[in-house]
Image (cartoon, coloured by chain):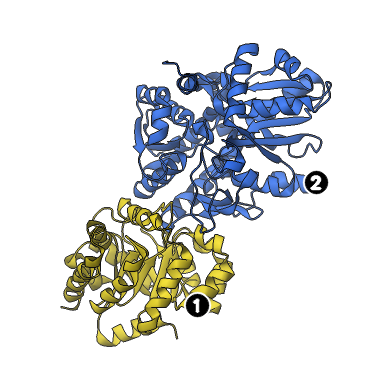
């Protein structure tokens, strides 16, 4: 475990060149370099500007509906029979997930840079919906790239995006999921770089995206920290969040980095089980490499080809992860594990039945692990789980698994 | 002296411009690549850019994405690609071969091991699309130690203030990307390219080759009037795709396109 001084330094990352230790960086083709430099300069200037901060905070309060509650899940706690489980209710945000915190921030950047066209990639469709939403509000044209398989399994969100005026472009190449949507969004950006703002949905990609997405999402952790102190009189003992690209997790974790006693646990998609190879758990069983503009843990074969992933949740179905998670793992400040499809489904049903809260399948991975963890902890200890999104979008998937027409 | 430098010096003496075809190694199947390389040299290619297949070629359009997919059906690895270069070198000790690809296969191989194997195979340069100069220090040093060139891209979006810095890291030649977009995209604007090439030349003594958007003999000729070389990829790869079921015909068919371009450039 790093010392306090190390933790303070860890929290200050990335460095000036966008690195978190050996991870992160800016691995893009030359055409995008100037756009990323411009974005970095714009962001650094605006993020320090009180007027920008005030506008961001105002939007989060009055448009998103923040602060989101920290809810003590009493019956879930009783069920697990150990530590007290609190849910950070990002599912109650406008559009139904944490994704909107980031799209509000990036849309403000787009507004200040004067770019009229927005593109985004999406897996489960939550980031696509959040991007389409802010684009509608600002009167910007929005194009969302989505893997053809995900278009199929997230029909409801596809239609939501269309209603919001966005154009959804199904991506047929590669594995037809989130990674391919991101490839295609990058290709669009390279082609239309002059008039296009690319709203990346997770804390990954080339510098400065991992930093700015984290900064926009860190509102989750700041609120949770204050709410936990207020409700329990002390900091939580553990934080649990699901990790695909890792934006909800880094948003929760980052404000706690210097709180040495607070364990931070990211839960990846274990799919059919990490031992089967059919999963999306690069931090649990992957290795470092370079994809989508950053160096990070990846699922790749010995020849360096990116491997296909599998998860019941489209939002976690991604072979990479944000670079800050890779460094937090190597430093030992955060721990990463995986929950299987089956464990996530069980948690989805359980939370729905005993708390009346239907979590997104992504967030269900975090809930599944929190239940296990709570059993191993004392009753006077607390766990904060990031309930990153609501499960309405997944009803179709769950019904299919149940063999029911929905 | 590197083969790339020798090739450009010879061209300069002859008053000719470089024709640089690109094909993806292993497309549509591994045994086509070496005969294809020889056929392109025979037809007038001065340097060969050989693509290392990658599962996620983010800077490429559909043509080269599909070429990668065809090559990967046969599990064409980076080690296999180096083997093809080695075989090519058995009968061609002169034509420079530049590998072009993405960083992850090189990272997984390990920089030192890759550079060692590439030097041993007779590779002359490496262009890594997603490795800009800022991230390239260690890799470039290792390549240069073994007399291989690190070739970098410049783009229409590259600020003039950055051009000299990119050139300082590179050697061999500069690959100027003629259009904003992916490979195989929009038609190029020759006048615009001419002014950019002139600007680049004011910052470096390196030769400037131009790629993206060259699709026929006329555009190859137009580019060779304003730059030191024309790089042509997607049009050749489309021909390979069309003949994927009859791979024996690929070397001659691709060579015919190369030859047309050569003739137009030398006229």
Where is B52 relative to A173, above or below? Answer: below
Q: Which mark is residue A377?
A: none
Residue that badge 1 annotates: B119
**Foreground residue among A81 and B75:** B75
Q: Is residue B30 left or right of residue A215?
A: left
**Foreground residue among B87 and A22:** B87
Subunit bearing disc 2: A
Pointer 2 and pointer 1 on the same chain: no
**Foreground residue among B224 and A360:** A360
Could you say whether the residue bearing mark 2 is in a helix, strand or loop? Answer: loop
Quadrant containing the C terminus of chain A is: top left
Give the colour in which the image draws chain B.
yellow
Q: Is residue A193 visible?
A: no
x then y, percent, for residue A70 = 68, 19
Residue shown at the point (30%, 73%) measured from the top left: B35
Q: Is residue B52 left or right of residue A343?
A: left
Give the colour in which the image draws chain A.
blue
Residue that badge 2 annotates: A1
Cα distance between the residues tagged 2 and 1:
42 Å
Local packing at callout 1 (Cα closer than 10 Å; few below 14, some 14-19, many 20+) is: some
**Foreground residue among A132 and A71:** A71
x then y, percent, for residue A57 = 59, 27
Tally of numbered tags: 2
Image quarter of residue A46: top right
Most distant residue in the bottom direction: B13
């Amino acid at each position: 475990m790093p010392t306090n001084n190390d933790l303070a330094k860890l929290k200050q990352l990335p460095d000036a060149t966008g690195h978190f230790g050996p991870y992160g960086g800016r691995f893009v083709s030359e055409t995008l370099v100037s756009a990323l430099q411009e974005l970095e300069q714009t962001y650094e200037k605006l993020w320090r500007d009180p007027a920008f901060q005030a506008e961001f905070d105002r939007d989060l309060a009055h448009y998103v509906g923040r602060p989101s509650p920290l809810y003590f899940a009493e019956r879930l706690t009783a069920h697990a029979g150990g530590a007290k489980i609190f849910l950070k209710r990002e599912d109650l945000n406008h559009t139904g997930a944490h994704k909107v915190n980031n799209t509000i921030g990036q849309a403000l950047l787009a507004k200040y840079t004067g770019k009229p066209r927005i593109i985004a990639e999406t897996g489960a469709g939550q980031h696509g919906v959040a991007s389409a939403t802010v684009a509608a509000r600002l009167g910007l044209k929005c194009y969302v790239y989505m893997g053809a398989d995900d278009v199929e399994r997230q029909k409801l969100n596809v239609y939501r995006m269309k209603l919001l005026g966005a154009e959804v472009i199904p991506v047929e190449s590669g594995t037809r999921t989130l990674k391919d949507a991101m490839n295609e969004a990058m290709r669009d950006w390279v082609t239309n770089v002059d008039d296009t703002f690319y709203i990346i949905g997770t804390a990954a990609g080339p510098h400065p995206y991992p930093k700015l997405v984290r900064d926009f999402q860190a509102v989750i952790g700041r609120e949770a920290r204050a709410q936990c102190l207020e409700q329990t009189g002390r900091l939580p003992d553990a934080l649990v969040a699901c990790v695909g690209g890792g934006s909800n997790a880094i948003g929760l974790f980052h404000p706690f980095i210097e709180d040495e006693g607070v364990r931070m646990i990211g839960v990846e998609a274990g799919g059919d089980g990490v031992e089967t190879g059919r999963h999306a758990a690069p931090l649990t069983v992957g290795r470092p490499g370079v994809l989508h503009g950053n160096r990070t843990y990846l699922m790749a074969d010995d020849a360096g080809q990116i491997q296909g992933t599998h998860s019941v949740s489209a939002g976690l179905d991604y072979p990479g992860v944000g670079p800050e998670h890779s460094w937090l793992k190597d430093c030992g400040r955060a721990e990463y594990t995986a929950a299987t499809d089956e464990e996530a489904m069980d948690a989805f049903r359980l939370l729905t039945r005993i708390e009346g809260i239907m979590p997104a399948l992504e967030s269900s991975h975090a809930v599944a692990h929190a239940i296990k963890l709570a059993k191993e902890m004392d009753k006077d200890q607390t766990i904060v789980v990031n309930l990153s999104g609501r499960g309405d979008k997944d009803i179709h998937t769950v019904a299919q698994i149940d063999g029911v027409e929905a | 002296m590197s083969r790339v430098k020798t090739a450009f010096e010879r061209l300069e003496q002859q008053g000719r411009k470089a024709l640089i075809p690109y094909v993806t190694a292993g497309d549509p199947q591994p045994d086509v690549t070496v005969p294809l390389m020889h056929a392109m040299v025979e037809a007038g290619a001065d340097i060969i850019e050989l693509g290392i297949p990658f599962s996620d070629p983010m800077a490429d359009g559909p043509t080269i994405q599909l070429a990668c997919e065809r090559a990967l059906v046969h599990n064409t690895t980076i080690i296999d690609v180096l083997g093809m270069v080695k075989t090519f070198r058995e009968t061609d000790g002169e034509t420079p071969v530049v590998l072009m690809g993405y960083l992850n296969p090189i990272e997984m191989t390990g920089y030192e091991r890759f550079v060692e194997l590439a030097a041993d195979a007779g590779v002359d340069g490496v262009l890594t699309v997603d490795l800009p100069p800022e991230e390239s220090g260690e890799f470039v040093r290792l390549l240069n130690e073994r007399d291989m060139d690190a070739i970098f891209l410049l783009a229409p979006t590259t600020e003039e203030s950055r051009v000299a810095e990119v050139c300082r890291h590179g050697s061999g030649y500069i690959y100027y990307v003629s259009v904003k977009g992916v490979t195989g995209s929009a038609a190029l604007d020759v006048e615009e390219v001419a002014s950019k090439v002139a600007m680049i030349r004011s910052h470096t003594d390196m030769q400037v080759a131009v790629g993206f958007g060259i699709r026929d003999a006329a555009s190859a000729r137009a580019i060779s009037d304003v730059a030191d070389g024309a790089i042509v990829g997607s049009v050749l790869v489309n021909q390979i795709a069309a003949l994927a079921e009859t791979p024996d015909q690929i070397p001659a068919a691709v060579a015919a396109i190369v030859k047309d371009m050569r003739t137009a450039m030398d006229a």
